[in-house]
Image (spheres, helix red, strand yellow):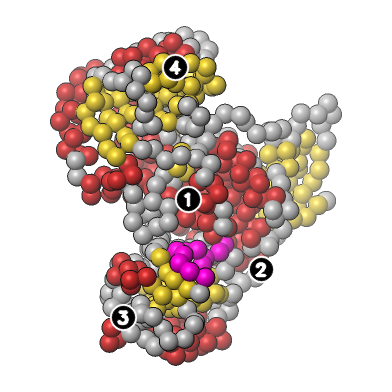
Amino acid sequence: MENTDVLIVGGGPTGLVLALELAAQKIPFRIIDKALGRSDKSRALVVQPRTLELLNRHGIARDLQERGNTVQGARYCVNGKEAVRIEVEQVAAQPNTAFPFQKLISQRDTEYFLDECLAKYGYSVERGLEASTIIQDADGVTVTLSTVGTSTEETTTVRAKFVVGCDGSRSIVRQAAGLTFDGESYQQHFILADTHVTWDTPTHDAMMCFGQGILAVLPLKDGMVRVFASGANVTKREGDPLLEDFQGFMDKMVPIGGKLHDPFWLARFYLHHRGVDRYSNGRLFIAGDAAHIHSPVGGQGMNTGIQDSINLGWKLAAVIRGERPMSFLDSYHAERYPVGQNLLKSTDRVFTFLSSTNPIFIFFRNLLLPWILPWAFGNPNRVRDAFKAMSEFSITYRDSDIVGTDAGFKEGNVRGGDRMLDGKIEGPEGQKYLLDLVDARTYHLFLLSSTGASAATEGDLQRAEASFLERSPVATKVHSIFGYKPNGQSGYIDVDAALHRELGFSHPTYILLRPDSYISHVGPLSALDDVTSRLQ
């Protein structure tokens, strides 16, 4: 019998990112997938800014975004006429981040990229293996692995401390854990095409079109587009759709002419929205589509699965190393379950509005949208807020038991459980972003001096750092961030004190980041000595 600390079942983006998290933490694991190779289909397309920010803890986000593209504009059309167009780069850019835009990157490219990153740690997905039986007890989990795609089935047994199911909507791990997966299927059927296009007027815009159905067009690389359609105009036939089905939809609903040709992928499918009652049972955990499936509205699905893994990975490592008790893992469900539930509800509301087949509803929707859309997208702040919701920057764990804010701390714009705002800092190596200092292995403590008469001195921050490191029970990297130029060479300068202003701090402050870069604790510098007790 082979032994490992963590067995990851499923080698898609969710499983690969969990593997990266464990590799960074130096935790032994295996990752298996029953598929013999990667799919050549694009599938999920959108990588959200927050996902890029979190992947940057591994130093890989900028390389990944180079493999994709940014939408230049977004057109919203009703009954074949353009209602409004927005310049994405002008009005949708998110502040306080090195990654202000969504990136369109096919899931295929994302998976191959993550494979390459995992190989640098000396790991790879073990293909052609499936978990046929999973039995847990008080001390661990026994898993029987069966080979797939061979003339004779072979089995091996693996003993793991934990098993994580990243194995999709039909998860064997979820079944073994006895978790429910309640929800419904949408009644409408949908068609999808990844195909080349020749536009009458060249464009790199995304398009959302309303008529007797819906049509979405997303620009891909190399002159290709993703076309997604549903509604009365979709030809009902057995098997995959034909390219002319999409061309007919395009001719009716898109105000600029375009000729589709040389399709790479044509598919017909149904969509579902389902979620589990819990994200774990004992030593069995689930993440990604094994925990929640929903419509593709907003490009949230793959990103949510990746962020499930980022939340879970460092917690498993802390328990395996004996730094935290088993009960610490309860925080995974406590923090990620509300995110998944909110996603299911919000995407269902929007998707129901978009894809309704009720003719009376469609008539009034299409009557009103030419008036509503210019109003809704005419306000840059409203557009930026909408893109912020999609970016996943607003996700917070404030209600979690393992984060906190000092009781006497009343100022500032962030609290324990929030995302840390990013901004430019300057050090001996030049300018960089604050979160470039963060990795996936340790806690990070930021000591912010503040500005003006109340600012802490270099000596104040050095003494605070020494006192914290003497008391801290876990590995922590400390960074001094000055709102002014210090006399010595230690620490970084907050360029133009912009971060201090955005964070809203007028007095010296500490911010302790967890290994997943969410704020573990925040408060005045004078209360820093009390923080180490929270790390026990």
Q: Amino acid at mark 1?
A: Thr
Q: Estimate the x, y position of residue 346 in percent, counting from the top left.
A: 34, 41
Q: Nearer the viewer, mark 2 or mark 4?
A: 4
The residue labelled by disc 4 is 260
Distance of mark 4 from mark 1, alpha carbons?
32 Å
Whether pointer 4 and pointer 1 mark residues with C-beta atoms closer than 8 Å, the reply is: no
Q: Estimate the x, y position of residue 294 in percent, counting from the top left.
A: 43, 36
**Which secondary structure, mark 3?**
loop
Whether pointer 1 and pointer 3 mark residues with C-beta atoms closer than 8 Å, the reply is: no
Q: Between residues 504 and 340, which one lies in front from this camera angle?
A: 504
Q: Is residue 406 above or below residue 389?
A: below
Q: Is residue 468 visible?
A: yes
Q: Between residues 277 and 13, which one lies in front from this camera angle?
A: 13
Q: Nearer the viewer, mark 1 or mark 2?
A: 1
Hey, which quadrant is residue 74 in on the image? top left
Hey, which quadrant is residue 426 in on the image? bottom left
Whether pointer 2 and pointer 3 mark residues with C-beta atoms closer than 8 Å, the reply is: no
Distance of mark 2 from mark 4, alpha carbons?
55 Å
Q: Estimate the x, y position of residue 239 in percent, counting from the top left.
A: 53, 12
Magenta region, residue range: 429-440
* Residue 231 colored in magenta in the image: no
Distance of mark 2 from mark 3, alpha carbons?
40 Å
The residue labelled by disc 3 is 451
Residue at the image position 27 percent from the left and 38 percent from the top: 86
Q: What is the number of the mark on residue 321? A: 2
Q: Amino acid at mark 2?
A: Arg
The residue labelled by disc 1 is 51
